[in-house]
Amino acid sequence: MHIVITGGAGFLGQRLAARLLARGELRGEAVQRLTLVDQLEPPCPPSDTVDVEGLALDITEPGALDSVLDARPHVVYHLAAVVSSAAEADLDLGMEVNFDATRALLEGCRERGLANTRLIMASSVAAYGGELPAVLDDMTALQPQNSYGTQKAMCELLINDYSRRGLIDGCVLRLPTIIVRPGRPNAAASSFASSILREPLNDEEAICPVAPSLELFVMSPAKVIEALVHGAEVPGEALAPFRAFMLPGITVSVAEMLDTLRQVAGDEALARVRHEPDPRIEAIVASWPARFETRRAQALGFAGDRSLHDIVMAFLEERSR
């Protein structure tokens, strides 16, 4: 079993690589080779049994993935992306990385006859937007209100069509907002959702740029990694007719997040959060829906978190290791 991860140096890419190595098998076969691809050479988790390789490649360059696809991987996790705020700020960069590189990846699979390669792309709740029902499902029409969501939506349609034609075996997982991410804030519009929990729990100040009433659809890092692994194992025939699925997150308001922070760490931690409205951030995040019916994903075996409290406690447990 040969597995490729684009965006392999990123938060999800590194966690997914570690999980696959710890698991040792996928789709009933032993993992023998793992290739991590990113702009800078990705760190390679150690393994005594798996050939792990990190490649520094600019996937926007023509033919960048030729050598990787020539090896005919069994599973490709396509996690490489320019995140929401950055894609909104730089349309050309967002199109090159989020759309053009994805199309080039699909064409590379097509040219090599990789019809049985499972290609799993991480999409986003940002693919939705506009006037929406109170509760959405996977088949709610996509009307993204920002460039990042538009680029992801276009890729979803391409992957579904290439799969319909038998050119690849695609699966698109729409990720909820992931909390609590470790590390430092990044350029994603939703970065504050982790920051207003993570920083106060680390005795640092955080800025909340949105109204407390704003709701988000969230999922823990551990459950996202479980979903990515599971996405490789669902039979292709079960994914049709449309191969994009909203993962089963939970709906929480910013006020509920702050109240959970207070319950876990006290008023002193809550006081470390400063409210400084940022209309640009709020406009992006408020366009993302927060309530979903996810029976399709659950019927295929994808699982979510039980509560926001569990998500925060999992972060604290991991931090203490």
Image: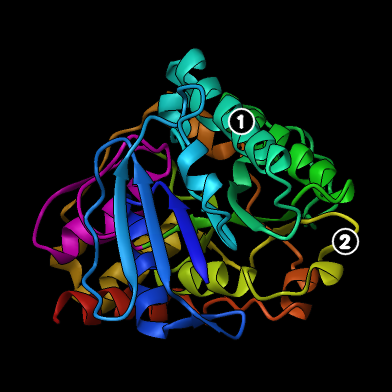
Disc assigned to residue 133: none
Quarter location, residue 39: top left
Local packing at callout 2 (Cα closer than 10 Å; few below 14, some 14-19, many 20+) is some
The image shows residue 194 at horizontal and vertical percentages of: 33, 55
The quarter in which the C terminus is drawn is bottom left
Vertical placement of 87 versus 300: above or below? above
For the point 21% across and 72% down, the residue is: 46
**Mark 1 = which residue?**
104
Helix, strand or loop at disc 2?
loop
Is residue 179 visible in the rendered image? The answer is yes
State left or right for residue 135 relative to residue 258.
right
Q: Is residue 199 magenta?
A: yes
Vertical placement of 35 versus 268: above or below? above
Quarter location, residue 158: top right
Q: Earlier in the sequence, mark 1 or mark 2?
A: 1
State left or right for residue 1 relative to residue 174.
left
Number of dots carrying numbers: 2
Vertical placement of 6 versus 16: above or below? above
For the point 23% across and 78% down, the residue is: 318
**Mark 2 = which residue?**
240
For the point 67% across and 39% down, the residue is: 106
* Amino acid of disc 2: Ala
Give how far apart the Cα atoms at labels 1 and 2 are. Answer: 23 Å
The image shows residue 100 at horizontal and vertical percentages of: 59, 25
Of badges 1 and 2, the one in the foreground is 1
Q: Is residue 108 magenta?
A: no
Question: Where are the magenta residues, as a range?
Answer: 180-209
